[in-house]
Image (cartoon, grey):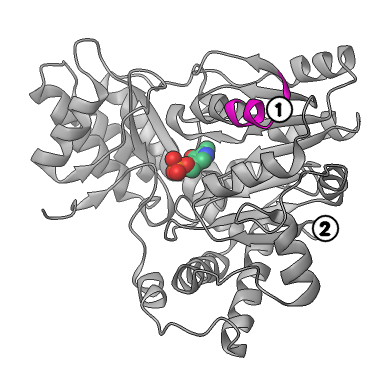
Amino acid sequence: MRPADFTLAAGPISVPPETLAALGSPILYHYDPAFIERFRAAEHRIGAIYGTQSHEIILMQGEAVLGLEAAARAIVRPGMACLNLVSGIFGKYFGYWLTAMGADLREIEVTYDEAIDPDAVAAYLDAHPEVEVVAVVHSETPSGTLNPVREIGPICRSRGVVTIVDCVSAFGGVELRPDEWQLDLLVAGPQKCLGGPPGMSLMAISDEAWALIAKNPDAPRGSFLSLLDWKEQWHGAGKFPFTPSVSDLHGVDAAAALLLEEGLDASIARHAHVAAACRAGVRGMGLSIWPAREEIAAPCVTAIRVPDEITDLQLRDHARAKYGVQLSGGQGAGPIIRIGHMGAAARPMYPIVGLAALGRSLLDLGARVDVGAGVEAALAWLSDSADEAEVSLAAAGLSA
Ligand SMILES: *Cc1c(COP(=O)(O)O)cnc(C)c1O
């Protein structure tokens, strides 16, 4: 079967030629000094994309789910009070791991079109000083929403609580400042906004998180899931705990180098710009975005409410079969179809392709939408708008 003509999914996504070339570069022995140099360069670049001076960067060799499970295993002791913030599928899922590790699980859960209220977190922590860990998802990819980790971090740090942040889909495309926002253990993936291949977990870990891990006698050692092995053996003694995924590392490093060459702020602005154009197109077509409020809509993916009588999977499959455009369904978060704006797909004409394929598929399946008006609204946004992303970065005091 032919691959899709356009991959506008919510990751993995198409990667640029430079990254493909790196993935196909010679396989090196892992203690070849050239590979060690490349591994350290990749750690450095990932640290730069995290924008952290203080966190230790650990690159684990496996899809980001490995990093998330490793984080839970490293930190959670049986009976430990953990507050899990649930605003979507990935947050809910993380709670199952916390429970599996023996945590005394508490949850603040909101509907999956909403975001966590930082005041509710503060109030819960004040009433329950026994809580040692808060877990939160930065960008809830299946429902296309963002959580206010910028506010949640300081609320937790000031109460001595360690945060675990799933920033898999936000990394490289959404503003994230672990140092200033006082976030502790962050897990990212390369196959989303970074625009790299799937297969690695990119982690940033604060001293506060390491201190909590040190209190856990059962934190894995001698295990594929061990953060401590990477810290002690690789960073401590220059020995890999096991053979790293050489090709994946090359691909991730190339993707990171490309992003840094473009500039982190430029990448963030690009994702915001394209997502805003897509939302304008959704409205113009007569559809609504899934997030309850525009302010919480994620820049990395636009989640759109699917009209009654049509399922997300029908729609996804139709757009792929008839128009060669790969969209994403809602992964069970609701009647949602998603247009991804990740990495190379976060460029102006991609949402136009996504909107056209989505709109025409909806018509084909019997829904009533104005495809032309939607496409025109997105184009008009791209053409007319002052770059919304630049404006918001300037407002945040971040532009040059
Ligand atoms: C993509 C993603 C992951 C990784 O999960 P996969 O289903 O293996 O892709 C974890 N968390 C979030 C928020 C993600 O978007």
Say if the magenta span includes residue 324: no
State how far apart marks 2 and 1 are (Cα).
30 Å
Q: Left or right: 230 with respect to 63?
A: right
Residue that label 1 marks? 102
Residue that label 2 marks? 54
Tell me residue 382's x, y (percent): 37, 44
In the image, the segment drawn in magenta is 96-105
Q: Can residue 300 be spotted in the picture?
A: no
Q: How crowded is mark 2: few (under 14 residues within 10 Å), some or many (20 or more)?
A: few
Residue 303 drawn above or below residue 250: above
Q: Left or right: 248 with respect to 20?
A: right
Q: Which of 129 and 358 is in front in this view?
A: 129
Residue 44 drawn above or below residue 117: below
Report the residue at 57% width, 45% height from top: 174
**Amino acid of disc 1:** Gly
Report the residue at 46% width, 67% height from top: 248
Residue 246 drawn above or below residue 220: below
Tell me residue 391's x, y (percent): 59, 43
